[in-house]
Image: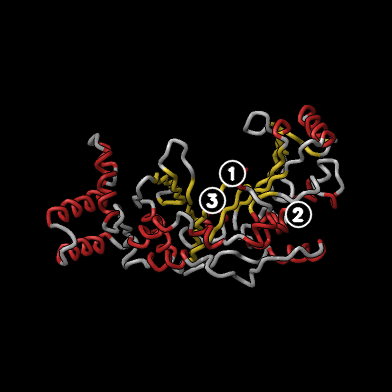
Amino acid sequence: MDTVSFAWRPTGDELLWRRLRGGAEDGHICGIWQVRPAGVPGGWMLKSKLGAASWFFYPEHELIYCEGRLGAILAGDLRDFSLGPFFALGIAALNLAELFAPVAGRDAEDGITGEPATLRRLDLAAELLWADPADGLAALGALADLHLPRVKVCEWRHEGRTETIAYYTATKKRRLLHRIYDKGVQTGSYPAGTLLRLERQHRIEKAKQETAEHVAQHADPESLWLDGFEDWADAAERLQVTSADGAERLLLEKVECGELQREKAERLLGSLAVARLRGEGWWRELGKPHLGRRRRRELADHGLPLSPSAKVPREVPLGEAIRALRAAWREPTNGQTATGSGARRTQRKQAANAATVQAGRKAN
């Protein structure tokens, strides 16, 4: 698990909301916790993170929520970028409620409302660790060329390489489906292309939110992981990540086996040559950027990126990596089991160990 968000709704608690409203007006709560307006009108947030999470409160809606990376929350350390285990959702929510309780004028043991937190967001994640960073860079660049119906692909590049790709629904109110990015570069822990992380974001509507402990004990993480995942995985698994020469050979092989007409193969071979020698700016300079996008889609339909990597002299086993991602949440990892409703002391002990557990299998 990567990012999670927990919510509390202390309805009708006049003392609590009077305290938080006063803090919003004064810019601080009891001179200890600094407060500033949040991005949404009527919302406020603590200036400093608490328990490695960002905190927000909305007096008019009687809502308090926090958001942060599960691994960092369990470790109590913002420098921890590890993945947290699914079973620890309830433990994390309990610890966070105890940390925020003094802000709300409560004893730590009482938490925020006396009621358990509900889960409003969870991002399941898995990582790919590449032995050769050049393979990871080529795979990430190729995934930016995926063409999927009713999906918008956004790519962010830095120093000539792809660092983040996000896939959104191509609708008026777009929704993030998943993202894949270079985690090693983000954390400074690995060279570019070595460690890639795929995240599946789930934002839960208020009416469907359940307690964090209930989700940890009864939800099926594999079904959450695979929900809406198959179309992307099928297309990604077909991608052939190879050099320019390798891409050209693959097109010719498709002609020889009758999968591709000669005329279309000639056009696609020309597109590969133009992209290699001049880049996609060729079509923009002609005033026809739509042709570049069309060529990208045509090549993607045959499992090829528009700009094959010149640094990869062999075929990169992207298909194997995608199959490993499919199975990342198939089985619990490192003894991942749901926790029972034991004593708080037992839960705290489990939480201390949970930060070293990674939910989601790493695949080579």
**With respect to residue 324, does 4 lie above or below?**
above
- Disc with the residue nearer the chain's start (3 vs 2): 2
Q: Which residue is identified by label 1?
A: 205
293 lies left or right of 200: left
- The quadrant of the picture occupied by the N terminus is bottom right
Q: Which residue is identified by label 2?
A: 94
Question: Residue 180 at x, y = what percent?
Answer: 47, 54
Question: Residue 97 at x, y = what percent?
Answer: 77, 49
Q: CA distance from mark 3 to mark 2?
A: 22 Å
Q: Secondary structure at mark 3?
A: strand
Q: Which residue is identified by label 3?
A: 201
**With respect to residue 207, does 334 lie above or below?**
below
Amino acid type at image mark 1? Glu
Name the residue rendered at 40%, 59% in the picture.
233
Name the residue rendered at 37%, 45% in the picture.
150
Name the residue rendered at 64%, 72% in the picture.
335
